[in-house]
Image: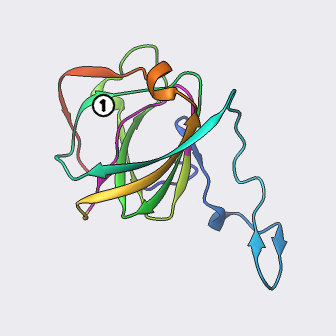
Amino acid sequence: MRLTEENLKGFGRLINSGAIAASIDEPEFAFSADVAQFTIQGKTTAGILTAKKRPLALEKFERHLRTPEILVALENDSLIAMAKPSETAPEPQHIHLFHVKQGEAFLIDPGTWHWVPFPVEAETCRLLVFFRENTGSEDGGVIEFAEKVHLSA
């Protein structure tokens, strides 16, 4: 599934400025303001995630209840599995696979289930990740599936 504003409803929001008219357009630059609005309580951190090529299957899923997560695809295309927020682990039929192209950026809403992206063609893909400080240790919410969830692109 393509990463579009319509497809992301209920999961998060697209941040790419390409779909939004520039609010400032000068000879030296163009700027698109307010491409995404979100609130993060406390310090925000940035990290680099390098995802490695592997079979298209999930053993784990996670969600963060106290922070949105912003991802920017720096190198190579990827596929990311997500499911809408729910109190319990999502059923496999509710897991959606989104195609993220290099250069695209998107926001994952708090509570949205997700896992490490899968590189599409390259051996790795790299993403810039922003979320609340200490999210991994304080708001990880990782679950393990009883059986691998096989996905199809």
Displayed quadrant of residue 19 = bottom right
Kind of residue at badge 1: Gln
Looking at the rendered structure, the number of numbered marks drawn on it comes to 1
**In the picture provided, is 152 more to the left or to the right than 130?**
left
Q: Nearer the viewer, residue 148 or 124?
A: 124
Q: Nearer the viewer, residue 17 or 40?
A: 40
The residue shown at (77%, 69%) is 22
Question: Is residue 108 covered in magenta?
Answer: yes
x, y (%) of residue 23?
A: 82, 66
Q: Callout 1 environment at 10 Å: few (<14), some (14 to 19), or many (20+)?
A: few
The image quadrant of residue 110 is: top right
Which is nearer the eye, 47 or 18?
47
From the viewer's perspective, is residue 61 above or below residue 32? above
Residue at position x 55%, y 35% in the image:
10
Up-down: is 74 above or below 112?
below
Residue position marked by numbered label 1 in the rendering: 93
Residue at the (23%, 41%) spot, across then down: 151
**In this picture, residue 144 sits left or right of residue 71:** left
Observer able to see residue 83:
yes
Q: Horizontal and vertical percent for residue 27? A: 81, 85
Q: Which residues are magenta?
A: 107-120
> Could you tell me which residue is drawn at 45 percent across and 22 percent down?
137
Determine whether, in the image, residue 110 is placed left or right of residue 53.
Answer: right
- Image: 19 above or below 1: below
User: Furthest residue to the top?
Assistant: 87
Label 1 secondary element = helix
